[in-house]
Image: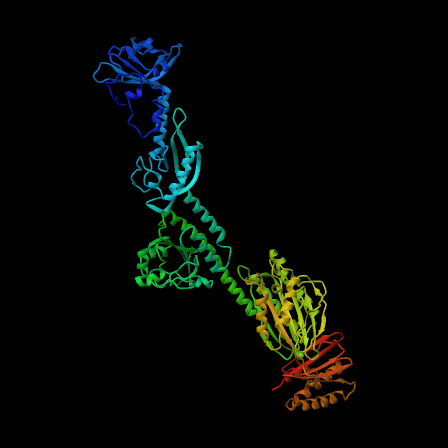
Amino acid sequence: MAIRNANDTDSVSAREAVSVPDTHSLSSAHVFAGLAAAVLDNRGSVVRWTEAAAELTGFPAEKVCGRPVQQLVADLSDELRSATTIPASGRVRLWHQCGNTVDVAFRTTKVNGSAEFLVLATPAHHVADHEHAAALLRALSSQNRITVALHDTDLTTVQTNATLGIPGGRPVQPGTRLCDVLCAEDAENLETVLRQVLETGASVVRSSLQVSWRHDPARRHALSLSAFRLEDARGRPTGVAALYIDGTDQLRARRHLELTREVAEQVGGSLDVVRTAQDLADTLVPAFGDLAAVDLATSVFDGDEPSEQLGSGDPHLRNAALAPTTAAWPPGIKPGNSVPPLSDHPLLRSSQHGQTVIYGREDIVALIGDPLSAENFLPKDAHAVMVAPLYARGLTLGNIVVWRTGRSDPFAEDEADLMRQIASRSALAIDNARRYTREHRAAVALQQRLLPPATTDTPAAETAGVYLPACDGAEISGDWYDAIALPSLRLALVAGDVVGHGIAASATMGRLRTAIQTLADLELEPDELLTRIADLVQRLAAEAPPGDRDFVGATCLYAVYDPVTCRCAMASAGHPPPVLVRPDGTTETVGIAPGPPLALSGMPYETTTIDLEPGSVLALYTDGLIDRGTDDADDGLRRLTHALAASCRADRALDETGRALLIDLVDEVPRDDATLLLARTRAIPAEYTAHREIPVGPAAVSEAREWATRQLTTWGLDDLLFTTELIISELVTNAIRYGRPPAELRLIRQNVLVCEVTDSSSTQPRLRRARTTDEGGRGLFLVAQLGARWGCRHGQNRKTIWSEQLIE
């Protein structure tokens, strides 16, 4: 501290004698509160004594002046007692008039042009407080992330450690206002807060705000503000102290953590490759960049593994997702577009080796090679792009590409690390979707190969089957349909649904379909056939691993339509009932008594027989067609019935009707397989059938041959007379010899000639090879050789042996 006005020896006011040039610190005013001053002569006697000194010691001037100053000092040290000069500074204890002592700190200075000394003293604790406050202010000011600003009552900056917001930026000078440093809106908002603190005295603690420097308005800084009012010794406001803690890095880290969490939650919820890529792109914008794209290897879209690509050339990538989709993307970047061939570039090779790379606009132009072509793949105002490879299980599936445009910040190194983590997690999700796509396609291919032709055309009916596999993460199940041509122009219709999903369900479906076709060829009644299939399912369950036995089961509906009698016999194993559409357009759900599902054996099935008019449509389906998750199955059945009534027209092809029904009834993203089998029935004209009873007697065989000859001549089938006579002779002879009356012979003419002999015996005929010495046993052998096929079916208390011959 320097002495000014040294010639002025007036002791009335110390403020008139001295001044402190450190005007940057408002806290210095507190030191001079109660500052005591005295003037000593060259012998150490008190010459002048201020009111502040009297208040400090309790001694008035008249009792002190003229006395040696040593008499006021208690416990005078030997060093001070033996001193020949007045010390420049120090600490002593002064006597108080009441007998106590006062610890003071003092400084002395010689008055120019005089032999006198000016002594300034203040309580020692005032000095300690000032030193601690100054040390605290220096410590706060030295922190990189903490800014201290002292403002006067006009909110002009008095002292601050702030710089202009860039490394090496010049300090903010005293006299600066907030609007000189911050953007106008931010400065106005901050001044409003500080003015409120100044006026009310209510402090602000850790108030969050975001500001931008005037020289860099695009970049926002997250600050935590604490502010309190400054007051003098009398409690009058002298300014505002503001403490700013820069939380930009913490905010950035928190946003990075939130982005990582959001990627984990949003990406991977779908097993569709494109949807997974779109979820990823949507998550990155605007949290990480202004624009984002996900490019995948062409083979990934089909579920196949991508080939390794190194160096320049065609990267074999196609765009899978863009975000935001409404942005003004350049013409070369569209969903499904291929990534153009790339030139050899060090950054490209780094990316192909699994590194996250940041490109500038010039780098992109160099990669594409032609500046004009590059403009087709560069978003407007893009100044930086980050490319992160999607690498999982040793495969590079594609790239994440994120652009920053306009005045947004360039990518930082920590953001490259973040993108590397996001790409690693997202690559697993996309690879899971890819592998699911591959397995789903394989299962669908297996399922479709196991299904019969979509349409059939037989004398009994024309049929059309449609199958829609589940999608969007749901595995296909074992739904199937079938139309099996049976002997005597009959037709078996099947619809079934295997429990479970995936390839295992498809394999089970294939086994059941094969078993049903085999049993159908034995011409079993529907209830008996389902009973045998139920036994088969029980065996399959027993063969399955212990943990999978509860998942082996199925429902099935089996129906047999006879175009000669126009009757349909059916039985159900826990399957939804069929829907009948009559020729006049009326519909009804067939009242069939369902038996237990095929997984449960030991329970009987019941056959229901109904009459069908020619031109009727019988609809068999699986529950995926009527069950929409939240709706009641009865409501789904009613929707199906109404849709069939509206769609099944005689002038409309059945396959077209089936496809339209699936579009109308199934969800856009079906959660379960859906199958539908439509059969439009036909009838064999009465003039194309003939039958007669076989009398008992030796002339029965010859009479049957003569009757059959006349009937074939009437039908114009003279070329089949010889073979038909032989077949009828053998069949009638067997019925007379091994069967029981009554017996009947029936002929049916359509695309084949059917010869049937029915008797009341349940004896099973058996084809065998007769020895050369045998007199009989060659009848069925001849029947098998003369006809296209033959067989035997059993009914209640009867059996029918039949033979078919092709009509050319």
Report x, y in % for residue 602: 71, 62
At 36% from the left edge and 61% from the top edge, which residue is drawn?
Answer: 377
At 40% from the left edge and 11% from the top edge, which residue is drawn?
Answer: 100
At 39% from the left edge and 37% from the top edge, which residue is drawn?
Answer: 244
Q: Tell me if 525 is positioned left or right of 329 in this view.
A: right
Rendered-image quadrant of the N terminus: top left
- Nearer to the camera, 805 or 60: 60
- Nearer to the camera, 790 or 294: 294
Report x, y in % for residue 415: 39, 48
The image quarter in which residue 328 lies: bottom left
Report x, y in % for residue 103: 36, 16
Q: Tell me if 432 is positioned left or right of 742 in this view.
A: left
Q: Tell me if 704 is positioned left or right of 179 in this view.
A: right
- Nearer to the camera, 131 or 213: 213
Rendered-image quadrant of the C terminus: bottom right
Report x, y in % for residue 688: 68, 85
